[in-house]
């Protein structure tokens, strides 16, 4: 078993073999937009005029509208809401790259090597197909009746991949052995259990739901007891395996992720049938945890899919009343267990930027029962009657005591004040403190003081606590919501170079041609450009990074592919300059064909060199004016350098002529 980091060489192989135009064209209609460039409508924001550019030869894309950009891996990450490792694995499977994993150090979970992972996924795909076929057999009548009684027809079962595991001890085991799987592979898959006489089917006589990762690969199953002679638990899930970790998987996310991303809303329900009922009722953002409470790893997944990162967005509302940062709505049964689950969810509230809510049906019905009893509309109305999670937590806390006594009021205040103090939006705390005073029948100032004291105590505890480490899968651009609040804004080309600035345009296009087509440049001309060749500070910053990569001349001489050179530049670029480099690398240049681009490249470098010499000449003239006339040696030195610069300018103009 190998650790979670993919070898750098394998990541590079994935980038090199992946066809950016093929991957992007599955989501964007592309058309030719110049030499080596294609254009289409951006998939990441609404637009009417295409501003999304890709350069297949460089392997990079950039949207001049919203500023997003990157390589083929980052595109797959963003379009499919995947982590870096998941995106690399997805592309590797598509383009036949064998991945190997390295030790990731402390705190990283183990991942199987790519071959093992592929075998485990294949075993689950075969199992899913087998279970689905079995649902149509006479033996599965009890399973079909279960689904029908809950309002799910054959089409619904097929949509969610529901199947049936026969009662036999080796039904699936025999199928998998017949497909070449070894006993060790069967054991590692979690599809079988180990007995004294060997392995046997884990799921027997049960209705089964495939549990998929965000890309749609089946990685486990959840199985519901149907038969009276089955003494096992009501629900039985796949055990922890190399590909299935219950703390980091959400049932239904594979079919809900696009709606979650577009609506910026996720509805968290408690079971497989609740997910089915919610989706069929029109609540297409419903997901559920699998055999475990909704926890920190689930929060990370939901935040990634929702784009839950802007701390201020949750305070603003769309026209339909939803927070722009999104909404996380938990649905729980109305019983004591449901209330306890809601309070556990409140513990995770601080991890979200999105606003968190709870929706509990008055009579305690879950979405599946509610749909059976009252229809689809009732399920939709349940979600729309959500209320803030912290309000539910406060109400639940104070409902446990007798508020008709002074002792009960004081106890309730001690229980509820810390809950109010933990409301993330400080502007809402005083209002909820006032509401709490009404619910308790206590003086408002007393409640406000208790909330203030609880907040101060919470603050001291936070200061004493060890600083939180960034999440292992957090992007390099920041550590989540708190980091975004103080992040330095990334530079955009339109912000640093005016379209009316001729010098800025020459410098921008010079950088663009060096990044896009270095092999068309003259080695001597590039080699003689000074380290401070650019007048626009931000462009000089790009040039500094390009020089620091140390391989520009290799790219010019054709010894290094332009795409690899661009990767090396981006690799050492800082967070603020990297987006600018990507934007310049995707800039359209005024040339119709390669010969025209070659002439443009030579003209740009000549003009860049002339501008650089002109600036140097101007600086020397100013220095000469400031020099003391009595300092003859210094005066003579500057005059000699002026003559040299002037000579180089004349020589350059003669070459142009």
Image (cartoon, rainbow, N blue to C red):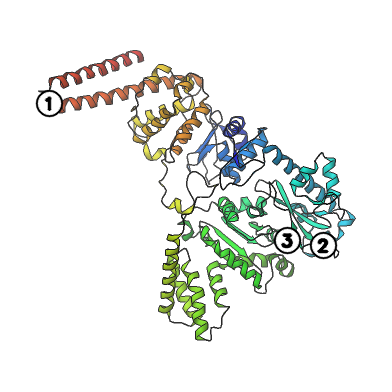
Which residue was labeled with disc 1? Answer: 628
Which residue was labeled with disc 2? Answer: 226
Q: CA distance from mark 2 to mark 3?
A: 14 Å
Q: Residue furthest right?
A: 138
Q: CA distance from mark 1 to mark 3?
A: 89 Å
Left or right: 120 with respect to 344? right
**Residue drawn 38% across the image and 40% down it:** 495
**Residue drawn 39% across the image and 18% down it:** 525
Confirm whether residue 623 shows in the render. Answer: yes
Q: Nearer the viewer, mark 1 or mark 3?
A: 1
Left or right: 395 with respect to 211? left
Percent of width and height locating residue 624: 17, 24
Q: Secondary structure at mark 3?
A: helix
Decide: few, some or many residues near mark 1? Use Cα within 10 Å; few <14, some 14-19, many ≥20: few
Percent of width and height locating residue 642: 22, 19
Sequence-wise, which precedes: disc 1 or disc 2? Answer: 2
Q: CA distance from mark 1 to mark 2?
A: 100 Å
380 up-or-down from 474: above or below: below
Q: Quadrant of residue 56 in the image?
A: top right
Left or right: 175 with respect to 608? right
Quadrant of the drawing holding the C terminus: top left
Confirm whether residue 596 shows in the render. Answer: no
Which residue was labeled with disc 3? Answer: 273
**Residue drawn 73% across the image and 70% down it:** 373
Q: Secondary structure at mark 1?
A: loop
Q: Are marks 1 and 3 in contact (CB under 8 Å)?
A: no
Camera-nearest residue between 148 and 143: 143
Quadrant of the drawing holding the N terminus: top right
150 up-or-down from 492: above or below: below
């Amino acid at each position: 078993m190998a650790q979670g980091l993919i070898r750098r060489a394998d990541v590079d192989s994935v980038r090199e073999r992946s066809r950016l135009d093929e991957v992007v064209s599955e989501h964007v209609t592309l058309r030719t937009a110049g030499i080596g460039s294609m254009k289409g409508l951006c998939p990441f924001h609404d637009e009417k005029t295409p501003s999304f550019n890709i350069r297949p030869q460089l392997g990079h894309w950039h949207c001049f509208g919203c500023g997003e950009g990157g390589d083929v891996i980052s595109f797959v990450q963003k379009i499919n809401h995947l982590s870096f490792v998941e995106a690399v694995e997805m592309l590797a499977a598509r383009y036949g790259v064998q991945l190997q994993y390295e030790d990731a150090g402390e705190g990283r979970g183990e991942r199987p090597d790519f071959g093992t992972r592929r075998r485990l996924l294949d075993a689950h795909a075969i199992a899913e197909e087998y279970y689905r076929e079995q649902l149509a057999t006479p033996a599965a009548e009890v399973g079909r009746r279960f689904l029908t009684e809950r309002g799910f027809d054959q089409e619904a079962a097929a949509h969610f991949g529901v199947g049936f595991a026969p009662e036999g001890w080796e039904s699936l085991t025999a199928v998998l052995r017949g497909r070449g799987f070894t006993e060790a592979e069967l054991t590692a898959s979690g599809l079988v259990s180990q007995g004294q006489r060997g392995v046997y089917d884990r799921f027997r006589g049960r209705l089964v739901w495939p549990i998929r990762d965000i890309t749609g690969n089946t990685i486990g199953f959840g199985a519901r007891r149907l038969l009276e002679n089955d003494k096992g638990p009501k629900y039985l899930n796949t055990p922890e395996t190399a590909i299935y970790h219950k703390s980091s998987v959400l049932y239904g996310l594979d079919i809900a992720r696009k709606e979650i991303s577009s609506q910026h809303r996720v509805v968290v329900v408690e079971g497989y049938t609740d997910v089915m009922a919610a989706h069929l009722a029109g609540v297409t953002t419903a997901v559920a945890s699998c055999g475990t409470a909704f926890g920190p790893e689930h929060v990370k997944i939901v935040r990634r899919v929702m784009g839950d990162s802007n701390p201020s967005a949750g305070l603003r509302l769309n026209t339909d009343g939803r927070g722009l940062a999104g909404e996380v709505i938990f649905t729980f049964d109305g019983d004591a267990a449901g209330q306890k689950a809601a309070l556990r969810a409140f513990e995770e509230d601080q991890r979200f930027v999105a606003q968190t809510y709870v929706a509990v049906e008055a009579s305690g019905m879950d979405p599946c029962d509610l749909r059976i009893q009252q229809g689809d509309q009732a399920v939709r109305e349940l979600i729309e009657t959500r209320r803030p999670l912290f309000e539910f937590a406060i109400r639940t806390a104070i409902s446990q005591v007798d508020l008709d006594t002074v002792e009960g009021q004081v106890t309730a205040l001690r229980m509820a004040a810390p809950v109010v103090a933990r409301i993330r939006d400080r502007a809402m705390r005083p209002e909820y403190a006032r509401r709490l005073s009404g619910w308790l029948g206590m003086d408002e100032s007393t409640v406000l003081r208790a909330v203030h004291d609880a907040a101060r105590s919470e603050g001291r505890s936070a200061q004493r606590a060890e600083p939180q480490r960034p999440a292992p899968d957090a992007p390099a651009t920041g550590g989540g919501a708190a980091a975004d609040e103080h992040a330095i804004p990334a530079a955009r080309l339109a912000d640093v170079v005016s379209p009316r600035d001729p010098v800025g345009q020459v410098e921008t296009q010079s950088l663009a041609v060096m990044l896009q087509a270095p092999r068309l440049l003259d080695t001597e001309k590039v080699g003689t450009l000074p380290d401070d060749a650019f007048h626009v500070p931000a462009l000089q910053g790009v040039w500094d990074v390009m020089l620091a990569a140390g391989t520009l001349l290799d790219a010019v001489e054709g010894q290094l592919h332009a795409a690899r050179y661009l990767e090396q530049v981006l690799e050492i670029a800082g967070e603020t300059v990297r987006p600018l480099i990507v934007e310049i690398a995707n800039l359209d240049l005024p040339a119709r064909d390669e010969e025209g681009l070659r002439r443009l490249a030579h003209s740009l470098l000549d003009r860049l060199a002339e501008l650089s010499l002109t600036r140097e000449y101007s600086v020397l003239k100013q220095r000469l004016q400031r020099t003391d006339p009595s300092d003859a040696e210094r005066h003579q030195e500057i005059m000699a350098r002026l003559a040299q610069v002037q000579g180089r300018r004349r020589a350059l103009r003669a070459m142009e002529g």
